[in-house]
Amino acid sequence: MKKLFVGNLPYSANETDLQNFFAENGVPIDSVTVMRDRFTGQARGFGFVEINDDAAAQRAVDACHGKDLMGRTLVVNEARPMTPREGGGGGGRPPRRA
């Protein structure tokens, strides 16, 4: 299973729009996720698609990278693994002195 990053998505695009876009370009996908803000639910402008066949995933990158979706030029490439983040919130305020 290959995971592809899809960037520069229109904020109005949803999972169905993305699935239809890949289908129109001759690439069947197994799953699609448009990333959304956890508080507002608004799309964040990127998402991921998963494709079961490695060769089909490469065809998807070749066929869809740089193509237009709803007025935006998409960036499509193989997703990089998430890297662990360091540190915690912290809040940004120094502790109060008595």
Image: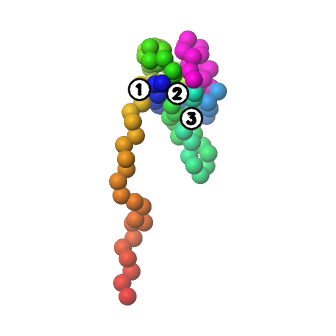
Lower sequence index among marks 2 and 1: 2
Q: Which residues are magenta?
A: 17-30
Residue 56 lies, in percent from the top left, at 48, 14
Marks 1/3: CA–CA distance:
16 Å
Residue, far right: 16
Q: Residue at x 37, y 47 (%)?
A: 84
Q: Quadrant of the C terminus?
A: bottom left
Marks 2/1: CA–CA distance:
10 Å
Depicted 90 relative to depicted 71: above or below: below
Mark 3 element type: strand
Query: Which is more foreground, mark 1 or mark 3?
Result: 1
Q: Is residue 26 magenta?
A: yes
Residue 72 visible somewhere in the drawing: no
Residue 36 lies, in percent from the top left, at 57, 42
Disc 3 residue type (three-letter):
Val
- Position of 98 compared to 19: left or right? left
Residue bearing the label numbered 1: 78
Residue bearing the label numbered 2: 49
Q: Residue at x 50, y 34 (%)?
A: 46
Residue bearing the label numbered 3: 34
Q: Residue at x 52, y 26 (%)?
A: 50
Marks 3/2: CA–CA distance:
9 Å
Numbered tag placed on residue 28 in the rendering:
none
Residue 48 visible somewhere in the drawing: yes
Q: Residue at x 59, y 52 (%)?
A: 39
Disc 1 residue type (three-letter):
Glu
Nearest the viewer among 72 and 36 is 36
User: Counting other residues with Cα less than 10 Å from the Cα at mark 2, is it few (<14), some (14-19), or many (20 or more)?
Assistant: many
- Pointer 2 and pointer 1: residues touching (CB < 8 Å)? no
Depicted 70 relative to depicted 87: above or below: above
Picture quadrant where residue 80 is located: top left
Picture quadrant where residue 18 is located: top right
